[in-house]
Amino acid sequence: IATQLSLLLYLGLVCYVAIVSLEGLALIDALEAGTGTATQAESLETRTRALAAMAVVLYLLTATLFICWMYTLRTSASVAPEAMRHSAGWTVGGWFVPILNLFRPYQIMVDLWRGMVRPARPFQGPGQPPVPVLVTLWWGAFLVTSVGGRLAVATVPAQADTFDQARQAFQTELLVDAVSVVAAVLAIGVLRMYTARARATPPPMPWTPIPNVWPSAASPRPDAQFPYGRPV
C-alpha cells in the first residue's frame, strides 16, 4: 500500500510539474509579446525550483519503497526459490551496479512472475511460462525515463539566458514528464498485478525424495534362509 501511495503521489507531482512547464511556455510567449512581467517570471522560477527538489525527494522515496517491495516478494513463500536465477541480494544490488542495472532488475521481475507459477519450475527447465507484456512495457518506459531523460536534460543549459533557451528547457521538461507519467502508470499496474498474483499463489510444495521400496542387498529377504521353501 505504501509503495502504491508513493507512486500515486509521484504521478500527481509529475503531472503538476508538466502543468507548470506549460505555464512557463505561455509566460515566455507573453514576455516576448511584452505582456508578461518580471514578477511572474520570478514566481515561476521559485515554483520550478521547489517542485524540482520535491520531485527528487519523492522519486528517491518511491524507488526505495519499490525495491523493498521487490525484496519482500522475492523472500516470500509465494515465490519458488528454484525459479530464481539470482540470489535475493541481487534484488537490491542489481539496481546500483552500473551497466548491470540496465537489465538485472528486469530479469528479477521476470523470475518473480515465473516463480509464482504452480507447480514450480526451475529457471533452467523447459516450458517457461510467458511474462505479461505490461512488465516489458514498464521496463522500457523506465529506461527511457532514466537514461533518455538524463541525456535530454544534459542538452539544456543550466541557466537560460535567452527566450529560446528557456523555451527549450520547458519543452524538454514536458517530454521527460510525459514519459515519466507513462512509466509511473505502468509501474502501478505491474505492482498491482504482482501483488494480486502473490496473494492467490499457494506456497510451493517441498520436494521430497521417493522412498526406496525395494530391499537392499544388505538386508536379505525374509525367506532367504529357506532357499527351497519353508518347511511344512
Image (cartoon, grey):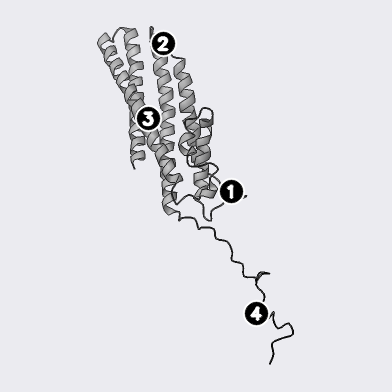
Viewer-proximal residue among 25 and 147:
147
Label 2: few (<14), some (14–19) or many (≥20) C-alpha neighbours in 10 Å: some
Residue at mark 3 to residue at mark 2: CA–CA distance: 29 Å
Query: What element does badge 4 sit on?
Result: loop
Query: What element does badge 1 sit on?
Result: loop
N-terminal of the pair, mark 3 or mark 1, is: 3
- Residue on which disc 4 sits: 222
Label 4: few (<14), some (14–19) or many (≥20) C-alpha neighbours in 10 Å: few
- Residue on which disc 1 sits: 128
- Residue on which disc 2 sits: 165
Position of 149 with respect to 23 (left or right) is: right
Residue at mark 3 to residue at mark 4: CA–CA distance: 72 Å
- Residue on which disc 3 sits: 60
Residue at mark 1 to residue at mark 4: CA–CA distance: 48 Å
Query: What element does badge 3 sit on?
Result: helix
| Residue depth check, mark 1 versus mark 2: number of the one nearer the observer | 1
N-terminal of the pair, mark 1 or mark 2, is: 1
| Residue depth check, mark 3 versus mark 1: number of the one nearer the observer | 3
Vertical placement of 158 versus 127: above or below?
above
Residue at 43% x, 23% y: name it.
175
| Residue depth check, mark 3 versus mark 2: number of the one nearer the observer | 3
Query: Answer yes or no: do the residues labelled 3 and 2 have beta carbons within 8 Å?
Result: no
The number of numbered discs placed on residues in the rendered structure image is 4
> Residue 214: where, in percent of width, then height?
65, 70
> Residue 163: where, in percent of width, then height?
38, 9
Residue 221 in view in this figure: yes
Q: Amino acid at mark 2?
A: Gln
Residue at mark 3 to residue at mark 1: CA–CA distance: 34 Å
Position of 5 with respect to 224 (left or right) is: left
Vertical placement of 156 versus 10: above or below?
above
Residue at mark 1 to residue at mark 2: CA–CA distance: 51 Å
